[in-house]
Amino acid sequence: MRYQLAFTLGELKDPARLEALAKLARRDAGDRWMRLAIESSLSEGAGRVFAELAADPAFRGSPAGRLFLADLARQAGAANRESEIAAVLKALGSVPSKEPAAAAAIVRGLSEGLAQRGSPLGKVLASDPQGKAAQVFAELLAAARKTAADAEQPPAARAEAVQTLSLGSFADGKEILTELLDSRQPQDVQVAALSTLARYHDPGVSELVLAAWPALSPRLRVQAAETMFARPERILALLAAIAAGDVSAGDVDPARLKQLASHKDAAIRQQAEKLLANLKLSRRQDVVDAHRDVLEMAGDAERGQAAFKKVCAACHKIGDVGYEIGPNLAALKARGAEAILVNMLDPSREVNPQFVNYALITDDGRTITGMIAAETATSVTLKRAENASDTVLRINIDELRGTGQSLMPEGVEKQLSKQEMADLIAYLLSLK
C-alpha cells in the first residue's frame, strides 16, 4: 500500500506531489523498495526533491539518507536536465564542510548519472558557481587513487576505490589501472580494475586489456571478455586478437561468439562468422559424453570445496562463501551426480527463466550483460558474476533482449580437471 502511494503520487501533475514524495522519503529512507518506488515516480523533479532532502541535516547525516541523496543525484545526472543538475549543485554548495561523507556521496551519484548519458563532467563542474563539486570530486578521486594503490589496505576497500576511479578519465586512471592488473595483485582488485575499464569509452582500453590478457587467470579472463564486449570497437579488437592467435578462442564463452554472428554491426558480424567457420566448437553433448567417466571416479568433498571456490563462487553461494546470484546448488543433491555433471558442462540445456542472460545495449553503444535482477517503471538492473551490477534508465536503453543462454558460461571443462569435477560433485552431494 505504501509503495503504491509513491507510484500514485508520481502520476499526479500537482507540484505538491514533490513535497509529498520528499515526506515519504524522510519517513522510509531505509526501506529499499520504498526508495525504488519514489525514484521510479520521479521521471521529472528529482532535482527539486533532492534539494529539499539535502537541506535536512538529520536526513543527510544518516547512512540511508546519504544513499537516497546519491540515488537522486544519479537520477538527475542521468536525466541530464540543466535545471535539475543546477539544483543538485546548488544544494551541494550548502552542505557544510564538516560533512564530507554526504558531499562525496552526492558528487559520486551525480558523476555516475552523467556518465550514463555520456555527458562531460568537466563542463558540468565548470558551471558550479561555488566550485564545491569540483573540489569534492578532485578529493574523491585523489583518495580513491591512494587507497587503490595501497597494498596495506584490505582488498575489498581497494576494489571499491578502484570502482570510484571510473568517475575520472581514462587518461588519469590508465597508469594505476595498468599496475592493478598485475598478477601479483589480489584477484578482487584485478576484477575491479577490469570492471572500471569497461566503463571508459577510450580506445586505449582495448590495448591495455589485451596486453594484460596472457597473465590473467581463467576467472579474470571471463571479466576481461566482458570488458571487451562492452563496446563495438573493443569487440572488433578482441576478434582480431583471436584471429591472430594472441587470444585463445577457448578463453571466450562459445555462446558469446555465436551471438556475435547475428550482431547488428556488419563488421562484427562478418568477423565473427569468419572466426566461427575456422573453429571446431564441440557440441555440449559431445563434451558431456567425453566426461561421463567422471561419474565413476572417487571424489573428495574437501578438495571439492576448493574447486567450488575456484569456479563456482563467482555466481553461487554456499554458507559464507561466494555470491548468491545463480540458483542454490544444494538443491542439485536430490537430482544426483549425473544431473550435476550435465548442468556443469551444459549450463544452457535447461535454464530457469530467472537466470537467463540478457544483453542490454545503451543509447551510447555500450553493451552490458547479466540476468535481470530488478525492474522499475524507469530502470532495469542487470547482475552478473562477482555480484557486479548495472542499473540503466529505460530512456537510455537502445535494445534489451534475452540471449536464451544461461548466465553461467560454457567451458568449465577448461578450468577443472576430471578429478576436480569428481571432487566438486562429491562436495555438492555432501551438502546438508
Image: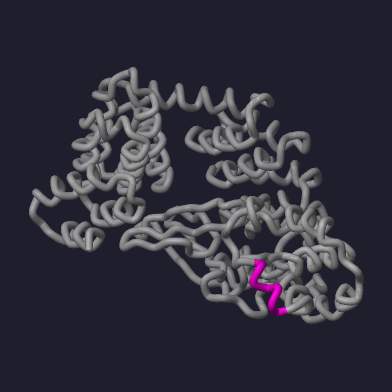
**Vertically, is 385 above or below 354?**
above
**Vertically, is 188 above or below 150?**
below
What colour scheme does the image use?
one colour
Which residue is painted at 45% across and 23% down in the image? 138
Place of residue 222 in the rendered image (x, y in percent of width and height, measured from the top left): 69, 55
**Vertically, is 314 above or below 254?**
above
Place of residue 111 in the rendered image (x, y in percent of width and height, measured from the top left): 40, 37
Furthest residue toward top = 98
Q: Quadrant of residue 70?
A: top left
Residue 100 in view, yes or no = yes
User: Is residue 186 or residue 116 the one in the foreground?
Assistant: 186
Q: Is residue 117 left or right of residue 231?
A: left
Looking at the image, how many numbered discs can be counted on the residues?
A: 0
Principal secondary structure, stretch drawn in magenta: helix
Place of residue 373 in the rendered image (x, y in percent of width and height, measured from the top left): 47, 62
Q: Is residue 49 left or right of residue 214?
A: left
Furthest residue toward front = 432
Which residue is painted at 43% across and 54% down in the image? 391
Residue 228 in view, yes or no = no
Which residue is painted at 53% across and 34% down in the image? 165
Examine the structure image and report whether residue 391 is included in the region drawn in magenta. Answer: no
State the extent of the magenta-drawn residues as a range.
Answer: 329-335
Examine the structure image and report whether residue 334 is included in the region drawn in magenta. Answer: yes
Q: Quadrant of residue 175?
A: top right
- Which part of the image, by quadrant, shows the N terminus? bottom left
Place of residue 84 in the rendered image (x, y in percent of width and height, measured from the top left): 24, 41
Q: Is residue 313 left or right of residue 371?
A: right
Q: Is residue 216 left or right of residue 396?
A: right
Which residue is painted at 82% across and 73% down in the image? 280
- Which part of the image, by quadrant, shows the C terminus? bottom right
